[in-house]
């Protein structure tokens, strides 16, 4: 039986689970699309290492198990990288200068002549916030 699939609003289709299992397709796999007249052909691209999340960890599906030596080398490289990152100096926090009230007042009131002092304006401004 050939399944009939429906497009959603975004133009996507969901392949039935049985079909995905038969073709060994999963999230993140790459599929090539060919259009010929009224026919659409989907072909899984094999041989490319697709990453997938497996039990919370990104894993590459290679089809062959990793050797103990390869795993140990990867762990040592990660530890070395993390140690170097921890030993490197942290970026200093950006220091904020004191607020420039004159510039702030000029932005707010532009060229208007003021009948009150800047201190009074600042205190009223502070009471608003």
Image (spheres, rainbow, N blue to C red):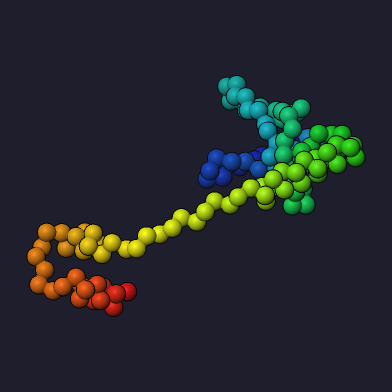
The image shows residue 12, relative to residue 121, as above or below, that is above
- In the picture, residue 114 is in which quadrant? bottom left
With 89 as the anchor, is 52 left or right in this view? Answer: right
Q: Residue at x 68, y 40 (%)?
A: 28
Q: Residue at x 32, y 63 (%)?
A: 99
The image shows residue 91, relative to residue 70, as above or below, that is below
Provide residue 10's location: percent of width, then percent of height: 53, 43
With 58 as the anchor, is 120 left or right in this view? Answer: left
Provide residue 11's location: percent of width, then percent of height: 55, 40
Provide residue 38's location: percent of width, then percent of height: 58, 25
Nearer-the-camera pick, 41 or 114: 114
The quadrant of the rendering that contains the C terminus is: bottom left
The residue lying furthest to the bottom in this view is 127
The residue lying furthest to the right in this view is 68
The quadrant of the rendering that contains the N terminus is: top right
Q: Is residue 108 visible?
A: no
Q: Is residue 77 visible?
A: yes
Provide residue 78's location: percent of width, then percent of height: 75, 44
């Amino acid at each position: 039986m050939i399944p009939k699939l429906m497009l959603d609003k975004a133009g996507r289709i969901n392949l039935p689970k049985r079909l995905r299992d038969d073709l060994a397709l999963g999230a993140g796999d790459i599929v090539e699309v060919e259009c010929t007249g009224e026919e659409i052909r989907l072909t899984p691209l094999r041989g490319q290492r697709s990453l997938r999340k497996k039990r919370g960890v990104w894993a590459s599906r290679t089809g062959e198990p990793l050797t103990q030596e390869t795993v140990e080398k990867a762990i040592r490289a990660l530890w070395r990288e993390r140690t170097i990152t921890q030993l490197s100096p942290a970026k200093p926090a950006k220091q904020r200068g004191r607020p420039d009230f004159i510039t702030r007042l000029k932005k707010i009131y532009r060229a208007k002549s003021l009948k009150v002092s800047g201190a009074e304006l600042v205190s009223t401004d502070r009471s608003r916030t």
